[in-house]
Amino acid sequence: MRFYKNQHKYYCGIDLHAKTMYVCILGSDGTILKHKNIACRPEPLLQLIAPYREDLAIAVECMFCWYWLADLCAREKITFVLGHALYMKAIHGGKAKNDKIDSEKIAMLLRGGMMPQAYVYPQEMRGARDLMRRRLYLVRKRGELLAHIQMTYHQYNFPAPTSELIYETNRNKLSIPFSDPAVVKMVESDLELVGHLTRSINRLVAYIESLKFEKQDVGFLLALLRSVPGIGYVLSATILYEIEDIARFPTVQDFISYCRLVKPKKTSAGKVTGGGGSKIGNHHLKWAFCEAVMLHLRDDARGKAYMDKLMKKHAKGKAMAIMAAKIARTVYFILQRRQTFNEEKFFAMAA
């Protein structure tokens, strides 16, 4: 957990929503100078903070609509601090909770050097990252539709389709044996949606593959990531754009923790009291590295042998998690050192 500890003359806490935001401005001595609910627009905010622009820091809790505020502060050269929502217990644990109280608490955390920081992802790469997240959402929705088709066949005791229905030829050849017209319509609607989602996903994948041409450095880093067995165009782009800059992780342990590939532990007086915090981190990176394990095992004989060795000591789930952490550790050093994948080093590290 990182805290923002820089000192300023004025501190601004904002409880941000889609249409309104409650703004609290504190002086360095903790005096409330402004406390007002305003519209979620740049003009009212700039007008409100105008007398305090000399040395001002603005803090907001990380939620879905912080992008525009971060970009506004960057343009206006105002210090912007993004608070990590899962660490801000002072906000969520109070007896009374409303926008006015929350904005003051955010300002007080900022002033006291106790504002837990989240990463402010840079504007120029944000759109591509969100596009890949959307692609994954569409892939999962398509998977739900395909699973529903399979379950419908099982419900009526018919052999389930064995061909890949993401391909149009296989969808056109599919036999629909149901006698009930309503069930036929249901399966046809699922197939139609699968086709529509597949076309959308293919267009997104084509765009993702073209990202390597946007900047020379991006193409080079994507090529380095694709040197790892099991990481292709989509996974390399997902990993690179979720990380953005590997230098923001001081150690490989910080990176593994961010990827949700370690089991957090809580201790007190030298005793383990439990676990927790498993949802703190980037679940998109966790998915990407778990997916890389499956593809690695499919294509790499040496990787399969190593997995068999792990499974003699651990259950399958834990063995897969260990392998995912190894791949994540490898990716960290590949990006840090800008070197391609070295199989001998990987299995020496994994031994």
Image (cartoon, helix red, strand yellow):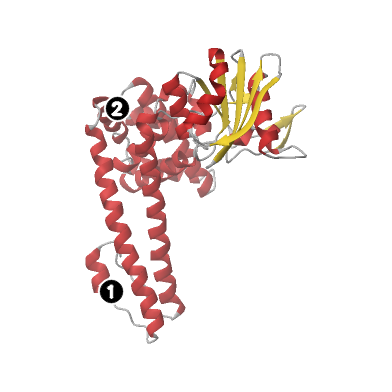
Q: Which picture quadrant has residue 268?
A: top right
The x, y position of residue 176, in whole percent, is: 32, 79
Mark 1 crowd level (few <14, some 14–19, many ≥20, 10 Å Cα) = some
Q: Residue at x 40, y 64 (%)?
A: 145
Left or right, residue 151 beside residue 117? left
On the image, the x and y values in percent for residue 124 come to 35, 30
Left or right of 319, for residue 98: right
What x and y, as percent, mark residue 226? 29, 36
Query: Which residue is found at the position 34% from the left and 64% from the top?
Result: 193
Q: Residue furthest bottom?
A: 179
Disc 2 to disc 1, how far (Cα)? 44 Å
Front of the two marks 2 and 1: 1
* Tag of residue 174: 1
Helix, strand or loop at label 2? It is loop
Q: Earlier in the sequence, mark 2 or mark 1?
A: 1
Residue 340 tag number: 2
Amino acid marked by disc 1:
Leu
Quadrant of the snapshot with the N terminus: top right
Q: Amino acid at mark 2?
A: Thr
Residue at image position (43%, 62%) is 144
* SS state under label 1: loop
Q: Dot 2 surroundings within 10 Å: few (below 14), some, or many (20 or more)?
A: some
Q: Quadrant of residue 279?
A: top right
**Of residues 140 and 89, the one drawn nearer to the viewer in this rendering:** 89
